[in-house]
């Protein structure tokens, strides 16, 4: 029997840290939490605020019996699907645990997997681009500060912020595309 | 031609509305003519749809800035790790020397009442379940005692129920191997109830279904065993556990074979071989080949059977486990036997029986003895059956197996000595021995005399 193509895509890479150790837990969390959130939000339509506790509980359950789990990725994906179904009460608990389809209809799609893969790459990238660029991108994109607010805080001219921002973004994007082997045309 | 200043280009690219209307038009005209400025503009005008959206997602920043979920889980993970280290230290002397009396004492101590102790005991029980089921039962009982004493809210997500479920499941495993089959079902009920309280995890329930299938199979309740094995396989598919999924599939094949439906069992074993080939798992190739060989024996495709058994044998000889290698040799001997090479088959079967005895697997040695008896019966050599039965009787007695199996072997000897042993008698004894292996309290009922 062949491993289904969709399943193979989120098979766990060989663990780097010892299973059941805090380092291994962190590695698993950082690798799979984005995917679990995406599945809960995009596949089940659960609001992010509700999805976060589900992700938390799936990991907490996993940490409690990590040594019983043969393949972490598929296990966690199965866990979030069950947790999401349970949360939505779309089916009774029995159906939630053993729904009728294989692979599960809620298994992550190509686009979700691609998005998560992109995001994981971006994380690695952000760790490398230097603290100034990182701080700038963080303020602008995540916190949503305007260029003039950033300029005020950093004692720059707004135009300088724009230029720095562009350069940082460009640097990030080039590195990102080189990592994904998809050069921007 | 003078170029557009970099800052102005950047502003035009990022926020064109911030540029005065007339100046914006001038820049647009210039860009159409100046490749150098166009290139600089493109530099600043990076489309953000693929990068900007990801950069605005807190997920992207989590390893750098952290999150409440991450902080909480890492704290919890560290606590679990600490509990496990403590448990390792606390339990080491007791796991090495598992005297039942000691458990009552230590379990009364508060410092032993941790999730780490339950995890450690569960793991210990699981690791020795097949080789020392009685000790495994002791560990599982101790795990249950601790797990049930833990507060329900000890862990987030009601995860303490996961530990309880596993403790009960380990108890059921040990009980199954000890032949305490009704008790095993009760333990599985408890495991199921506990696992059912952690809705995030279908894996536990699938494991319960697999163990229950094993118990039902042992009880020869093949239809019910099949339903459970299917349920387990389905559950493992959803939990993404390919290994356990194959375990469940293998059991389904065994159940079908036991039910005499080799035609339905064969595709399952072929699937297992294919899985082994796809995942480069020699173990699955060997186990699937062994199962397929047994199917082909039943289907009288002896050439095919031989190919499968030899494929399995090469792997088991190299990688073990030794008992599985002996089972495969048994299969090859049966192929010879059915192919009409009775003398050669009997010689090989005697070797296999001796190897089972050396491994302490006396019931299987007796089953091989019954195969030999069939051959000797066909060759009209009943005296040798008497000698064989005497040997089996002493083997069972020496092994301390004083169950109905002894009566069955005594009957074999008696009937052979009286020259009234039939193939039907041998088959009845075989069925009984298989059941008595897991249900020691079964009593042997002599087959009705047909002549």
Image: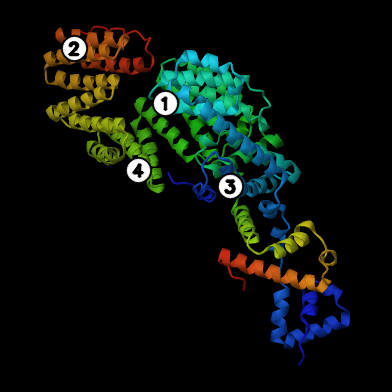
**Disc 2/disc 3 C-alpha distance (Å):** 61 Å
| Left-right relation of B268 to B451 | right
The chain identifier of the residue carrying mark 1 reads B
Circle 2 packing at 10 Å, graded few (<14), some (14-19), many (20+), is some
First reached walking from the N terminus: tag 2 or tag 4 = 4
Can you tell which mark lies on residue A27?
3
- In the image, B383 versus B401, the foreground residue is B401
**Disc 2/disc 1 C-alpha distance (Å):** 33 Å
- Position of residue B237 relative to residue A121, above or below, is above
- In the image, B278 versus A125, the foreground residue is A125
- In the image, B176 versus A65, the foreground residue is A65
Please tell me if label 4 and label 1 are on a single chain. yes
Circle 4 packing at 10 Å, graded few (<14), some (14-19), many (20+), is some
Camera-nearest label, 2 or 1: 1
Measuring from the top left, give residue B284's x and y in whole percent. 37, 40
| Left-right relation of A165 to B219 | right
Number of numbered discs present?
4
Determine the image quadrant of residue A155. Answer: bottom right
Please tell me if label 2 and label 4 are on a single chain. yes
Can you tell which mark lies on residue B282?
4
Position of the C terminus of chain A by quadrant? bottom right
Please tell me if label 2 and label 3 are on a single chain. no
Please tell me if label 4 and label 3 are on a single chain. no
**Residue drawn 50% across and 18% down?**
B185
Can you tell which mark lies on residue B393?
none
**Disc 2/disc 4 C-alpha distance (Å):** 40 Å
Measuring from the top left, give residue B389's x and y in whole percent. 19, 13
The residue indicated by pointer 1 is: B128
The residue indicated by pointer 2 is: B390
Residue A84 makes an appearance in the image: no
Measuring from the top left, give residue B348's x and y in whole percent. 17, 29
């Amino acid at each position: 029997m062949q491993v289904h193509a969709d399943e193979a895509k989120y098979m766990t890479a060989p663990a780097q840290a010892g299973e059941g150790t805090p380092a291994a837990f962190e590695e698993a969390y950082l690798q799979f939490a984005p995917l679990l959130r995406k599945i809960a939000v995009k596949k089940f339509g659960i609001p992010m605020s509700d999805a976060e506790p589900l992700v938390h509980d799936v990991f907490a359950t996993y940490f409690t019996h990590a040594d019983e789990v043969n393949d972490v990725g598929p296990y966690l994906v199965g866990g979030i699907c069950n947790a999401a179904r349970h949360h939505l009460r779309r089916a009774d608990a029995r159906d939630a645990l053993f729904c009728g389809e294989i692979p599960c209809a809620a298994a992550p799609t190509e686009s979700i997997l691609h998005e998560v893969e992109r995001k994981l790459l971006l994380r690695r990238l952000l760790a490398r681009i230097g603290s100034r660029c990182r701080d700038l991108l963080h303020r602008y994109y995540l916190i949503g500060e305007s260029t003039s607010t950033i300029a005020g805080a950093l004692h720059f001219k707004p135009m300088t912020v724009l230029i720095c921002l562009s350069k940082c973004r460009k640097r990030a994007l080039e590195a990102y595309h080189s990592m994904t082997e998809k050069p921007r045309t | 031609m003078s170029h557009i200043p970099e800052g102005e280009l950047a502003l035009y690219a990022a926020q064109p509305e911030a540029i005065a209307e007339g100046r914006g038009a001038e820049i647009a005209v210039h860009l159409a003519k100046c490749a150098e400025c166009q290139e600089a503009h493109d530099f600043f005008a990076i489309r953000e749809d693929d990068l900007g959206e990801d950069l605005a997602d807190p997920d992207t920043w989590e390893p750098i800035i952290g999150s409440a979920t991450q902080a909480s889980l890492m704290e919890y993970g560290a606590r679990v790790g600490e509990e496990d280290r403590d448990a390792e230290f606390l339990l080491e002397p007791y796991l090495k020397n598992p005297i039942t009396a000691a458990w009552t004492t230590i379990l009364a101590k508060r410092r032993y009442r941790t999730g780490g102790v339950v995890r450690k005991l569960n793991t210990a029980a699981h690791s020795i379940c097949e080789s020392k089921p009685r000790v495994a039962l002791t560990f599982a009982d101790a795990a249950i005692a601790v797990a049930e004493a833990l507060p329900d809210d000890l862990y987030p997500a009601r995860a303490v129920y996961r530990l309880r479920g596993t403790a009960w499941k380990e108890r059921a495993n040990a009980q199954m191997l000890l032949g305490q089959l009704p008790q095993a079902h009760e333990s599985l009920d408890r495991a199921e109830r506990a696992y059912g309280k952690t809705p995030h995890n279908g894996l536990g329930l699938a494991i319960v279904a697999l163990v229950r299938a094993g118990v039902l199979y042992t009880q020869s309740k093949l239809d019910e065993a099949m339903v459970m094995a299917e349920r387990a396989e389905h559950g493992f598919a959803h939990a993404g556990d390919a290994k356990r999924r194959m375990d469940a599939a293998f059991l389904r094949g065994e159940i079908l074979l036991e039910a005499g439906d080799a035609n339905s069992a064969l595709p399952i074993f072929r699937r297992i071989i294919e899985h082994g080939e796809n995942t480069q798992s020699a173990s699955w190739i060997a186990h699937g080949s062994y199962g397929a060989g047994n199917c082909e024996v039943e289907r009288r495709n002896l050439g095919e059977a031989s190919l499968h058994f030899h494929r399995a044998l090469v792997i088991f000889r190299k990688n073990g486990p030794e008992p599985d290698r002996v089972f495969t040799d048994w299969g090859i001997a049966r192929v010879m036997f059915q192919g009409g090479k009775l003398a050669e088959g009997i010689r090989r079967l005697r070797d296999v029986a001796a190897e089972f005895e050396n491994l302490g697997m006396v019931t299987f040695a007796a089953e091989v003895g019954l195969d030999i008896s069939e051959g000797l019966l066909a060759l009209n050599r009943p005296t040798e059956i008497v000698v064989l039965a005497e040997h089996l009787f002493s083997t069972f007695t020496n092994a301390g197996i004083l169950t109905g199996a002894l009566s069955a072997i005594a009957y074999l000897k008696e009937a052979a000595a009286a020259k009234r042993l039939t193939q039907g008698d041998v088959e009845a004894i075989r069925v009984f021995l298989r059941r008595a292996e897991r249900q020691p309290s079964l009593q042997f009922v002599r087959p009705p005399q047909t002549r």
